[in-house]
């Protein structure tokens, strides 16, 4: 299974052989790398200079090696999300969860992240066949954890805005009341999604165990990944809760 750094970048040394082959193949077929190889072949065919083949192969090999270390290529090849521009995404979700004020939201997020880690551990400690089948699951789990914390942080920020605006004297305009109503609705939706995420992560542990003992584990793995994709889509759809 690809081992991801806090920001979601795979460590090449920790990739499974299958994932490593995919990354190497993608690096080998990069247009620029192939172009270097073609130019070297054409130049050798035209000049028959003895030093062209080793120079070409050396340059091509170096470009392929550097390509396998490229986090953008790794993400694209392994189906991970693009790197986040926000430096906060380079912080592990458990540490970012500590930025939440103490209360119900933080408790739910901490509980969900604890289940997330247990699911990841269940996959990583399973047999080789199960890990191969669930190769694409752990990146999805990392994305879920990151998005869950994003939603929780936005929820608390929006809830604080609602409290502040409610304490300010009204100007008599109905626009503020409508904005507050919409913002509160978004806060409530985020709260429901945080609770749902926790419940779904609880169910995932049992699903991983069933996949490890079921002969038809490939089909169940696809269903598990589909449910994670749906969960991530719902979390992402919340977007910026504080936006209009």
Image (cartoon, rainbow, N blue to C red):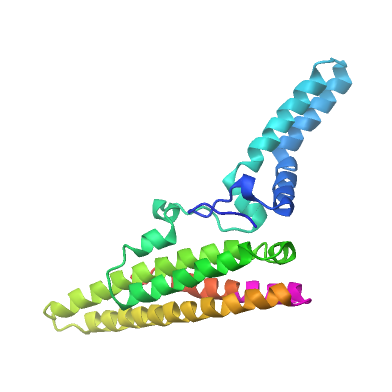
Total label count? Answer: 0
Please report the residue visible at 14 percent of the width from the left and 84 percent of the height from the top.
172
Residue 227 in percent (x, y) is at: 61, 76
Which residue occupies the extreme left position in the image? 169
Residue 108 lies, with reference to residue 141, above or below; the image says below
Residue 22 in percent (x, y) is at: 73, 51
Please report the residue visible at 43 percent of the width from the left and 55 percent of the height from the top.
89
Residue 73 in percent (x, y) is at: 63, 47
Residue 168 in percent (x, y) is at: 13, 77
Nearer to me, 124 or 7: 124
- Magenta-colored stretch includes residue 220: yes
Nearer to me, 221 or 188: 221
Q: Quadrant of residue 40?
A: top right
What residue range appears in magenta?
214-227
Residue 71 lies, with reference to residue 215, above or below; the image says above
Q: Quadrant of residue 164?
A: bottom left
Please report the residue visible at 33 percent of the width from the left and 81 percent of the height from the top.
182
The C terminus, quarter of image: bottom left
Please report the residue visible at 53 percent of the width from the left and 71 percent of the height from the top.
232
Viewer can see residue 77: yes
């Amino acid at each position: 299974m690809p081992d991801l750094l806090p920001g979601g970048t795979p460590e090449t040394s920790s990739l499974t052989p299958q994932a490593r082959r995919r990354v190497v193949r993608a690096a080998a077929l990069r247009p620029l790398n192939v172009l270097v190889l073609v130019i070297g072949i054409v130049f050798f065919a035209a000049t028959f200079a003895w030093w062209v083949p080793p120079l070409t192969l050396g340059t091509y090999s170096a470009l392929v090696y550097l390509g396998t270390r490229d986090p953008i290529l790794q993400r694209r090849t392994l189906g991970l999300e693009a790197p986040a521009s926000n430096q906060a995404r380079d912080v592990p979700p458990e540490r970012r969860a500590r930025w939440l004020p103490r209360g119900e939201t933080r408790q739910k997020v901490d509980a969900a992240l604890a289940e997330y880690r247990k699911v990841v551990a269940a996959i990583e400690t399973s047999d080789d066949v199960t890990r191969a089948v669930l190769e694409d699951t752990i990146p999805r789990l990392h994305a879920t954890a990151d998005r869950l914390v994003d939603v929780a942080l936005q929820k608390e920020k929006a809830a604080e805005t609602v409290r502040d605006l409610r304490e300010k004297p009204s100007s008599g305009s109905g626009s503020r009341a409508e904005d507050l109503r919409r913002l509160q609705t978004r806060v409530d939706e985020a709260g429901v999604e945080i609770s749902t995420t926790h419940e779904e992560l609880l169910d995932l542990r049992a699903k991983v165990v069933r996949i490890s003992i079921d002969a038809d584990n490939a089909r169940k793995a696809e269903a598990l990944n589909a449910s994670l994709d749906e969960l991530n889509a719902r979390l992402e759809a919340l977007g910026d809760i504080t936006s209009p």
